[in-house]
Amino acid sequence: MFTLKKKIVAVISLAVMLAFGISWLLLYGVVRNGIVRQSTLELSQQTALLAASLKEGGMERFSANVKKWEDILRGRITLIGANGVVLADTERSPEAMENHLTRPEVKEALASGEGSALRYSATTNIYYLYFARRVETEGRVAVLRAAYPLEFLSEAFAETRNKFILYLFVAVVLILAFGTWLARLFFRPLDRIVEFAGKIAQGEAVRFPIMAEPELQRLSSALDGMSARLRGAMTELRTEREDLSRIVTALPVGVVLLDEERRVRYLNDVGKRLLCVKEEAPHGVPVERILPSGDMYPLVEAAMNGEEDCLTLDLPELDKRYLRICSRRTSSGVLLVISDLTEEYRLEQSRRDFIADAGHELQTPLASIRLAAEFLMEGSKRSEEDETCLSTIIAQQERMTRLVDDLLLLSRMESEPPLHAEEEVDLCGLLSAVVEENRSHPLAGRIVVEEEYECEAPAVVRSEDIARALNNIVENAVKYVHEKFGDEEGGRILVSVRPEKLFWSVRVEDNGPGISSETAGVLFQRFRRGDSHRARGKWGKGGYGLGLAIARKIVLDAGGDILLHPSDEGAVFEVLLPRKD
């Protein structure tokens, strides 16, 4: 692996070698051209000497003594006729040689008197530097050509190249040594900084060294500041992690944290107890091994897809526990939160059983009380005070009976499946019948009940249950409007049905005493009534606060909702019921 030092040294060496290589190319061209020019000059002089000899002795004498000239000049000499036929050559027989009229140096010499070329000779299979000169002798025109084999030039080039490579090698060695020493000199302070950074990474409380160079001083100071902030952040993170671990451990719910591979990263003690995990450290195990029910696994898959969901399960195999498990996607996996609802379910079941048992048990004494009161009412000897007391007993017996009936109904709705099947009904017709029934209410004598309906409002609901819920709301409006106005005029109730996006909106508006904001939040709870304006004005009148609780339970079971809207005067109840698809 190349370190930064090695890279710097390599770059310097490469730059030097590149510079030497370019220099060699330039030098090679200069030396080559110089040698070629010098050789060309020498060949020119030699051909001039040969031309003088040729003119003096003639062609026959020159051809006979051509070998002598080869020994003297140490080069190849060729005599060529004006027609390109070779007349004499120092290396080959003229008869075996081809016509030389197309040779560039010959053509140039015939045209201008002199010609030169550096090329490959197909005759001798060697590269030559040729120089040709036109000569006129004995009334004939000939071309006298001298050539140096490229071996002479190659030797000169090789000598120059070898010296250059030697100098280059020496220079590279020196530069590598100098570059290595320079890199170590420059990187020694950085090595110290790296050394101290390693100590800090191992948790040692050290400071970065102070350097002599201003740039490295600033770097060391910046790293010291960063190290201090990092230590502070790590300490804070460690503290927060410990606090979070204590908080999660102390939570009354089970917490399971999964990674992207659906393996357990964290499981607190409550989670182990609720899931009955026997392993001491289940970290890294697949989540399937700790989930007691296969119905829980789809929550993990949904959370991996970014969908949050909750599920309540009855697990008889886990000591008859009721567990609620919620899933949520995190940045690194899935979070499962498990709540133990066993005690709540048992208390709720005990409450339902108590209400059912007490309701049934109270029916007999209530019937006996009414029977006894009616028997006494039929007697002939009784005073006006006796009649008042007996009427009060009968009225309270009726209220107690209605209370027991409502409690039994509410308990049955929460614990048993509905008795009636859903059917398609027209909410306008259903609500019209409810309004007509309440117009005949004893307290609705002077109250004006108005209706605003669509032509039809089809919905698939349990008609008897919805009719009971709507009747409770309308009857409440009648009671409390009468509570405000009594037997005087001015009371008004508006009942309307309007379409929303997915629901039918059934609104019941009255101008009664109204409901305070403090009471509005708890009005739909059991045994909770309105504020003092809606309290019973006289002992023996009014209900016990179960009507709205029953209405809300019916509407929620139908897939809708019941809302109380703020109003300057009176109360506005809105029932939302799903529209038929």
Image (tube, rainbow, N blue to C red):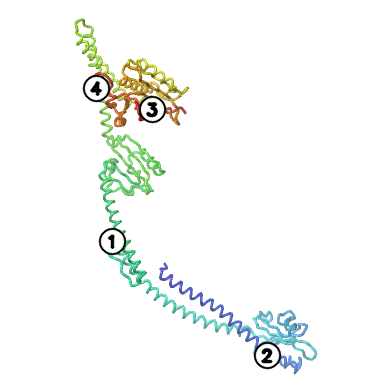
- Dot 2, crowdedness within 10 Å: few (<14), some or many (≥20)? many
Residue that lies at the very extreme toward the front in this rendered image: 489
Which residue corresponds to mark 3?
574
Question: In the image, 103: left or right of 472?
Answer: right
Front-most of 513 and 157? 513
* Residues at discs 3 and 1 in contact (Cβ within 8 Å): no
- Dot 1, crowdedness within 10 Å: few (<14), some or many (≥20)? few
Question: The residue tagged with tag 3: helix, strand or loop?
Answer: strand
- Dot 4, crowdedness within 10 Å: few (<14), some or many (≥20)? some
Query: Which picture quadrant has residue 542?
Result: top left
Q: CA distance from mark 3 to mark 4?
A: 34 Å
* Residues at discs 3 and 4 in contact (Cβ within 8 Å): no
- Dot 3, crowdedness within 10 Å: few (<14), some or many (≥20)? many
Mark 1: which amino acid?
Answer: Gly
Disc on res. 358? 4
Question: In the image, 451: left or right of 136?
Answer: left
* Residues at discs 2 and 4 in contact (Cβ within 8 Å): no
Question: In the image, 10: left or right of 130?
Answer: left
Which residue corresponds to mark 1?
203
